[in-house]
Image (tube, grey):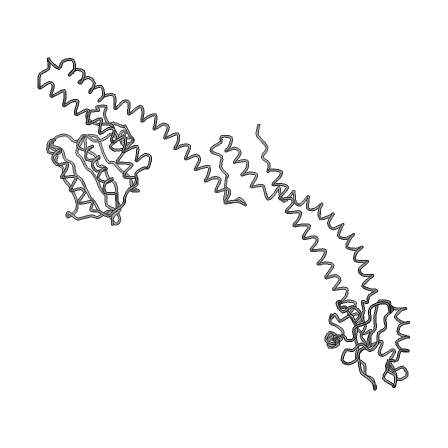
């Protein structure tokens, strides 16, 4: 039964909580911003509508019969007493101030006399700014009774024979502020609670929908990961570049591929280990049996054997001991190469000189078999390559040994060096028995023989070692051969 793939409740809760906080925060900001600008709009509208109020008051109340100042220069309080009665009938929230030309508060008309005494001076700059726009602008001026606040106002300049000054009217006085604050508190509570309630509902709906949509690809990846965990090693995220979290998807696919490769490598190592044990047991059995047989013969028939026979038996024992030694050395060498314990020491050297030395070393063995061994390089050119000289020498020795085994008397072996633009091709060409197409497919695998004759063909590790050495130099060993027509083994080395 297929398990349902879901995200953990903790992750869903965190996503929903983050989205809720974001939406609620946006809602609160919207409420505050909306309230601020709606209040500013209301004040600007109220100021523009009431901008002519001060001028109307001057035109209506100030005249020759009712001047603003008496002959002794004092304020005509009778005029302002009548003004107070008019204010009570029309608008109880406004406050009227008479200002001198320097902004000094000369007199005030307010309905509440229990409030603080007004400031002595009012800043004239906002007044002049409003008058310069004809009352069409939006300016906040000083409140003489609350110096910390700035409020909307109406103002007008008047001329008088005694004194000149300004009529300055606060349009939203203390009464207005109190009423506005009470209304705002009620409004903000009802509006805020309603907005937060609706926001919460929409947050739940939108949040769950958004989480489902945004985590769709994550659920797919979780499903693939679950399948991989349960043993489906071929489970991969399809089209990872098209997902919202392509980095994670690609990383998972790469991880799965790495795990698969490691598992395959472990399986191959285990198979190779079993093959190694079987092949080593097989290859060691023959020389050990020969050693034991000849040793027992010498022990049992030592007195009856002639000196020549004893010498022949000892030569057989010595020869097989050498073969065992060589086999063990090859096993150690190959195991190090297989375990990647050998790192090539790259250096510049002359491949031409190395091949000449090898031809000289193997010349005696070749002559004993009546085989011609030579080096073929164009115009005897000294070719420099970048490689590990000891490993390349070991690889060429194995190839020459292999060629000597399979080349009949009167045959030939040619070491060839051929230059290309960036590489030097090294080849070993023999006129031996050749290799069948079927054998060529497995000839570089360890313990693969082209014949069952141990005494002739050895343990089958020589070409496997050559392949590993060539691969360490980022190259590839190739073979070109046909039956009874000889073989050519070749690989490339980087030129200097």
> Residue 330's quadrant in the figure?
top left
| Left or right of residue 100: residue 394 | left
Q: Position of residue 136 (x, y in %)?
A: 75, 72
Position above or below: 330 against 116: above
Which is more toward the observer, 78 or 260? 78
Query: Which residue is at the front of the view, 279 or 298?
Result: 298
The quarter of the image holding the N terminus is top right
- Judge whether residue 91 can be spotted in this image: no
Q: Which residue is at the far left? A: 307
From the top left corner, tell me how far across and down residue 123 is, in percent.
74, 75
Is residue 80 visible in the rendered image? The answer is yes
Dividing the picture into quarters, in which one does residue 407 lie?
A: top left
Q: Residue at x 73, y 49 (%)?
A: 196
Within the image, what quadrant is residue 219 found in?
top right
Q: Is residue 56 left or right of residue 265?
A: right
Q: Is residue 274 left or right of residue 491?
A: right
Residue at x 13% of width, y 15% of height: 302
Is 36 situated left or right of 257 in this image? right
Rendered view: 82 above or below 438: below
Position of residue 33 measured from the top left corner of the image (x, y, whole percent): 70, 58
Q: Position of residue 345 (x, y in %)?
A: 27, 43
């Amino acid at each position: 039964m297929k398990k349902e793939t879901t995200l953990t409740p903790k992750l869903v809760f965190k996503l929903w909580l983050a989205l809720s906080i974001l939406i609620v925060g946006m809602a609160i900001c919207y409420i505050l911003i909306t309230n601020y600008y709606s209040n500013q709009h209301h004040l600007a509208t109220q100021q523009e509508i009431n901008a002519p109020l001060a001028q109307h008051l001057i035109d209506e109340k100030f005249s020759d019969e009712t001047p603003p100042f008496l002959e002794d220069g004092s304020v005509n309080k009778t005029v302002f007493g009548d003004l107070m009665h008019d204010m009570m009938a029309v608008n109880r929230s406004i406050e009227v101030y008479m200002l001198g030309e320097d902004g000094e508060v000369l007199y005030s008309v307010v309905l509440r006399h229990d409030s603080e005494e007004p400031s002595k001076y009012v800043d004239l700059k906002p007044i002049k700014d409003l008058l310069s726009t004809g009352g069409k602008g939006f300016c906040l001026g000083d409140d003489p009774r609350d110096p910390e606040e700035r409020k909307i106002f109406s103002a007008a300049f008047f001329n008088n024979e005694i004194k000149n000054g300004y009529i300055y009217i606060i349009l939203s006085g203390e009464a207005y502020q109190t009423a506005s604050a009470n209304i705002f508190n009620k409004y903000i509570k009802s509006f805020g609670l309603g907005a937060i309630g609706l926001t919460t509902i929409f947050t739940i709906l939108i949040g769950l929908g958004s989480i489902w949509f945004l985590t769709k690809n994550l659920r797919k990846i979780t499903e693939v990961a679950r399948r991989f965990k349960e043993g489906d090693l071929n489970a991969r995220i399809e089209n990872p570049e098209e997902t919202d979290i392509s980095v994670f998807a690609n990383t998972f696919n790469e991880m799965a591929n790495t795990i698969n490769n490691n598992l395959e490598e472990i399986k191959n190592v285990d198979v190779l280990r079993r093959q190694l044990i079987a092949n080593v047991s097989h290859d060691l059995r023959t020389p050990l049996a020969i050693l034991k047989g000849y040793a027992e013969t010498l022990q049992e028939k030592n007195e009856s054997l002639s000196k020549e026979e004893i010498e022949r038996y000892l030569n057989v024992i010595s020869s097989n001991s050498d073969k065992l030694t060589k086999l063990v050395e090859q096993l150690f060498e190959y195991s190090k190469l297989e375990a990647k314990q050998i790192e090539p020491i790259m250096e510049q050297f002359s491949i031409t000189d190395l091949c000449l030395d090898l031809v000289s070393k193997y010349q005696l063995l070749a002559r004993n078999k009546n085989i011609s061994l030579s080096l073929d390089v164009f115009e005897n050119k000294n070719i420099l390559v970048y490689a590990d000289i000891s490993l390349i020498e070991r690889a060429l020795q194995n190839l020459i040994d292999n060629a000597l085994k399979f080349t009949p008397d009167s045959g030939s072996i040619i070491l060839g060096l051929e230059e290309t633009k960036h590489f030097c091709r090294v080849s070993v060409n023999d006129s031996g028995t050749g290799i069948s197409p079927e054998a060529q497919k497995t000839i570089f695998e360890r313990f693969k023989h082209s014949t069952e004759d141990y005494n002739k063909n050895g343990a089958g590790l020589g070409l496997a070692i050559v392949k590993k050495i060539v691969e360490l130099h980022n190259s590839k060993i190739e073979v070109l051969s046909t039956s009874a027509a000889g073989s050519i083994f070749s690989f490339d080395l980087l030129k200097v």
